[in-house]
Amino acid sequence: MSEAAVITRPPASETGYSSRGSVLIIDDEAAIRESLETLLQLEGYAVECAAGGEEGLARIAERSFDLVLLDVALPDRDGIDLLAEIHHQDPQLVVIMITAYGTVENAVRAMQAGATNFVQKPWDNEKLLADVRTAIGRRRAEEENIQLKRALKQRYNFENIVGKSEPMLRIFDLVGHVAASRSTILLQGESGTGKELIAKAIHLNSSRRDRPFVAVNTGSTPPDLLESTLFGHIKGAFTSAIASKKGLFEIADHGTLFLDEIGTMSLDTQSKILRVLQDRKFMHLGGVHEVQVDVRIIAATNADLKQQVKEGKFREDLFYRLNVITIDLPPLRQRKEDIPLLAAFFLKKYSKENNRPPASLTPEALRPLLAYSWPGNVRELENAIERAVVLSTGPEISPELLPDPIVGRAAAFPPLEHRRDASLFDIMEDCERHIIVDMLEKCGWNQTEAAERFRIPLSTLNQKIKRLNIEIKRKGRE
Ligand SMILES: Nc1ncnc2c1ncn2[C@@H]1O[C@H](COP(=O)(O)OP(=O)(O)OP(=O)(O)O)[C@@H](O)[C@H]1O
Ligand SMILES: [Mg+2]
């Protein structure tokens, strides 16, 4: 099912957005810039101008354009060198060179250097517009082609979800059923259970598969930045908004937007997201016009959203909006029959990646894998197998190649016989410290993640860290 999108956009001249395309003019002569700008704007293009090479490069670094009109003879830079630098920044960017009348050598040099075309001053308006139209059309077709290829590759990778346990088979079934609709989906599960993998599978099994799948970590992005990332902004919306930028809702138009770690989003952003979920309409930051998009939303969380609603940390109305279809990814310890299958899958993957003959587990190595509780779930298993393959010297993976906690080796904990002078309380504290440090290490010293995995409030974990004098080594990973 493919719904037609109604995109209500303000005039290009106002915001810099235009469905016809965006053009950057780099020319040192103000009169040339102005007349080209007017000509293109009247045709509906979004136009920006730069008076020199350096300024032009800065613009291209800030945002993407469909086409650049570049003067060969600039006072600060040689146009041909600049062309090479532009292509270094954006290899697909179409550049039409502007040359002075009669300098054929320049035109030839420009084409050799990778310009798509050139126009001679004084130019013919109709011809110039036709060249711009053709060049932008070609760029868009190329982009679509790249996207299509990427999607095909991903579709091939869809085979890469492994599982034969009852709950996983039910999930595969559910994915097949819900993929075709536009319903919002909420994926819940502990860290590393495969939420993002399932989100991609839903997208690739839907009619949106050739359109973008855009993922955003709503939990780790600061609220202000998150809003401009999601909704885009117009030039001048805030001090650093020197150019208009599209938001991810627009980039994901006709595709899927994956809102990851939704449980830690600020209440303010939650209310804005709620509005988009209701009618798929929003405004650019600093904008005055509504934009309508056709986006499928998949949200993921490893937090207990219902509990967060009770605690007033998550909006109840947003929870119900998101909770249309919920898929619960069970922790790996509750589907142990998947472990041998996953292990074999990762052994094959990492043997191949490391140019090794296919490796296999000895029965002694499989035993601890089945007994272990896997707080980091499939990701932890994947990492353990990758490490074992890299450390192995032959095709067999024996228990020595597995990480300490998995094979039950208490790596850093001092044996009790060395602690004769310590009371039981001291030993218990040491034990607690050891377990907490171990988990923090696993979570890249991200306290929020560690608290979630321990299933205790963050404040409790922080109290323990303080009481046990645990030195926080690194900041939480992103
Ligand atoms: N069923 C599965 N089959 C094969 N690989 C899997 C499976 N589940 C997860 N993985 C792999 O495990 C890793 C973690 O998965 P993913 O990133 O989807 O988890 P997540 O639930 O989004 O984790 P987090 O909450 O930490 O973001 C990925 O490399 C993914 O490919
Ligand atoms: Mg994830």
Image (spheres, rainbow, N blue to C red):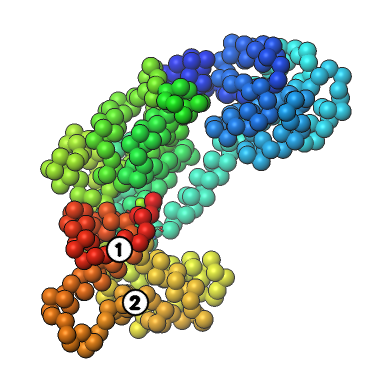
To which residue does mark 2 refer?
404
List x then y, in percent, for residue 430. 21, 74
- Residue 137 picture quarter: top right
To which residue does mark 1 refer?
471
Question: Marks 2/1: CA distance?
Answer: 22 Å
Q: Secondary structure at mark 2?
A: loop
**In which quadrant is the N terminus drawn?**
top left
Q: Give the residue at x 33% y 27%.
A: 280
Q: Position of 420 compared to 55: left or right?
A: left
Query: Does any atom of ligand 1 lie closer than 8 Å to the CB of label 2?
Result: no
In the image, 114 versus 157, the foreground residue is 114
| Amino acid at the residue labelled 2 | Asp
- Number of residues whose C-alpha sits closer than 10 Å to that of mark 1, classed few (under 14), some (14–19) or many (20 or more): few
In the image, 193 versus 91, the foreground residue is 91
| Amino acid at the residue labelled 1 | Glu
Q: Give the residue at x 72% y 38%.
A: 84
> Viewer-nearest of labels 2 and 1?
1
Q: Give the residue at x 38% y 16%.
A: 288
| 254 w.r.t. 169: above or below | above
- Residue 6 picture quarter: top left
| 265 w.r.t. 161: above or below | above
Q: Give the residue at x 68% y 25%.
A: 52
